[in-house]
Amino acid sequence: MMLHVPGVLSPDQVASLRALIDAADWEDGNATSGKQSRLAKNNLQLPEGSDAARDAGAKVREAVTKSALFMAAALPHTVYPPLFNRYGPGQTFGDHVDNALRFQRHQDIRIRTDLSATLFLADPDSYDGGELIVEDTYGAHEVKLPAGDLILYPASSLHRVTPVTRGERVASFFWIQSLIRDDTKRALLFDMDVAIQNLARDVGLGAPAIVSLTGTYQNLLRMWAEL
């Protein structure tokens, strides 16, 4: 399941975050690449252990956990500390699949990457190219979102970033280990959650049907969740 999560950061929050990371020193993006990704990747990245990366990452983590839509879709067990990259003219990231496991070198964190997330931090009109292309059984999906919006998609997906031809693409990216490992089950729970919320607005939260459906949702979550 792919999901567009709008307004994770407000324009003021984007500006504050950009001021923090733009003033920092950046390094070759291959510092955190696997062997296969290293062959396809050409960008810059904020050093993972830098003060700027930690401070900016904490702001992103706080913002996503305040997003009801993100939380409902991801059902996160662990959110990997967010990273930051930028692509200037000629830079790109070819076809790749994210590593199944991620280890934080500076903290005692290790996760299974069930979901990948990209939080856009540059106005889409400020750069050409730089689209995120995610492939699934329904074809290739092109993503280029307003600054402050996030795209969530299965980490098992083949994806790429097209070459930037003008301006600069800046984003935060990170991975999530979900309480629900299976993408199909996670999508079913999300659809049920959304349906319950919509129905509750029509008939009231205390209606017997809402109580019954909420119980079913919780029991499925209890059956499938991995802690």
Image (cartoon, helix red, strand yellow):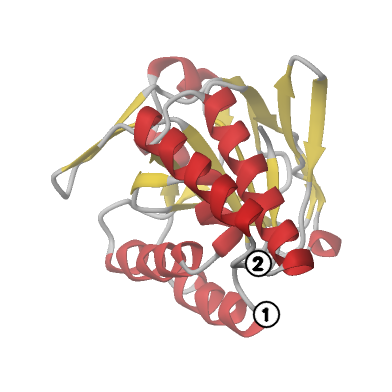
**Viewer can see residue 105:** yes
Residue bearing the label numbered 2:
148
Quadrant housing the C terminus? top left
Q: Position of residue 42 (x, y in %)?
A: 57, 34
Three-letter amino acid code of the residue under disc 1? Pro
Number of marks in picture: 2
Is 116 left or right of 198, judged from the image as shown? left
Q: Residue furthest left?
A: 108
Label located before the other in sequence (2 or 1)? 1
Residue 221: quarter of image: top left
| Quadrant for the N terminus in the image | top right
> Measuring 50% from the left and 35% from the top, which residue is drawn there?
115
Res 54 → quadrant: bottom left
Q: Residue at x 59, y 67 (%)?
A: 206
Judging by the rendered image, the residue that carries numbered circle 1 is 11
The spot of residue 22 in percent (x, y) is 51, 70
